[in-house]
Image (cartoon, helix red, strand yellow):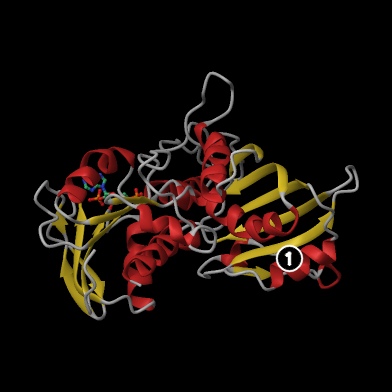
Amino acid sequence: MKKKSAYCVAVVGATGAVGTEMIEVLEERKFPVEKLVPLASSRSAGGTVMFHGQDIPIQALQKDSFAGVDIALFSAGTDVSREYAPIAAKAGTVVIDNSAAWRMDKDVPLVVPEVNPHDVLHHKGIIANPNCSTIQMVVALKPLHDAARIRRVVVTTFQSVSGTGREAMDELMDECKDLLGFKEPTPKVYPHQIAFNCLPHIDEFLPSGYTKEEMKMLHETRKIMGDSTIQVTATTVRVPVYVGHSESVNIETEKKLSANDARAILSTAPGVLVYDDPAHQIYPTPLDAAGKDEVYVGRIREDESIQNGLNLWVVADNLRKGAALNAVQIAELLIK
Ligand code: A2P
């Protein structure tokens, strides 16, 4: 991409939970935007989004939407990315795609700026933003991997409804209202009631019994960390939280790391905030991390059941570090 003083940036899915956040993060971080092109479905055309105090008209996404666009941040789902990302790339736009459509394509870098920033250099028009749960986990694990080589990860996630999108956020609110009014809720987005409940089911089930979300955590972690030997086994759970994914992460390392070693390493790691003082009830919760950029890590303990193991509790804002912020950080690397 040619270096410029400011860029034409499109946001595909500009009205969605992640798209809205992308526009906010572009503004907050003063990304050099010469022109913002908000794109959504034809349902939203004619509406506006606010950017630097101005109402910018939303346009319906079309094949010719990318003329003159330098960078497009995609957050309108896998089908839209599969169809339109190659069209945009062909028009000379660099696509930063938040969907699962291109993540495991060998020609598409999968980037977390704190972990593998130089992979951005190898793009051929499309760069993928990893899955939200994977992003926050690898930000916390990379410095520990560098220090002690992680062999195996056992992770359970507690993922907020905003990861599914706006309709799911509305569903949680509607179900809460129904239940508090003694009315039976009717789930539409999720297969079961999400209010006051937990669903061990994110994305589709595979014949193995795992979900696609669980397998993303294995395959994407290996690709981002550049280490195909790391073993990851995951259970991903949807919980009735609006914003912020939490993860219970158990790691087994080649070299011994004490909890204090891990705390010291993580306290200087990029993008990480160690929030760990159980004696004073200090540990990360989704409410702490919502609206923040850092990946919060707490409850750092040695796993006493094995020789070299640690337990961590990792929390981040899934819409920001898990999606919009990571995408904008990739755009920042691109123009550097
Ligand atoms: P729209 O609001 O017009 O439906 P979320 O992940 O929060 O559900 O948001 C999805 C985003 O993707 C919204 O901005 C939505 O626009 C957009 N979107 C969905 N389908 C399409 C499509 N076929 N073409 C363009 N944008 C789409």
User: Looking at the figure, which quarter contains the N terminus?
Assistant: bottom left
Given residues 154 and 160, the one toward you in this image is: 154
Which of the 4 image quadrants contains residue 118?
A: bottom left
Given residues 273 and 317, the one toward you in this image is: 273
Given residues 209 and 159, the one toward you in this image is: 209
Given residues 146 and 330, the one toward you in this image is: 146
* Residue 123 image position (x, y, % from top left): 33, 52
Q: Residue at x 21, y 50 (%)?
A: 89
Q: Residue at x 58, y 66 (%)?
A: 289
Which of the 4 image quadrants contains residue 156?
A: top right
Tell me if 134 is positioned left or right of 34 in this view.
right
Q: Residue at x 33, y 62 (%)?
A: 20
Tell me if 211 is positioned left or right of 141 in this view.
left
Check disc 1 and give the amino acid type. Tyr
**Secondary structure under the numbered disc 1 in the rendered image:** loop
Q: Residue at x 20, y 63 (%)?
A: 70
- The residue that disc 1 covers is 283
* Residue 172 image position (x, y, % from top left): 48, 48
Residue 148 in sight from this viewpoint:
yes
| Numbered disc total | 1
Which of the 4 image quadrants contains residue 208?
A: top right
* Residue 246 image position (x, y, % from top left): 63, 53
* Residue 68 image position (x, y, % from top left): 11, 62
Residue 245 in sight from this viewpoint:
no
Above or below, 101 against 262 in this view is: above
Above or below, 214 against 227 in this view is: above
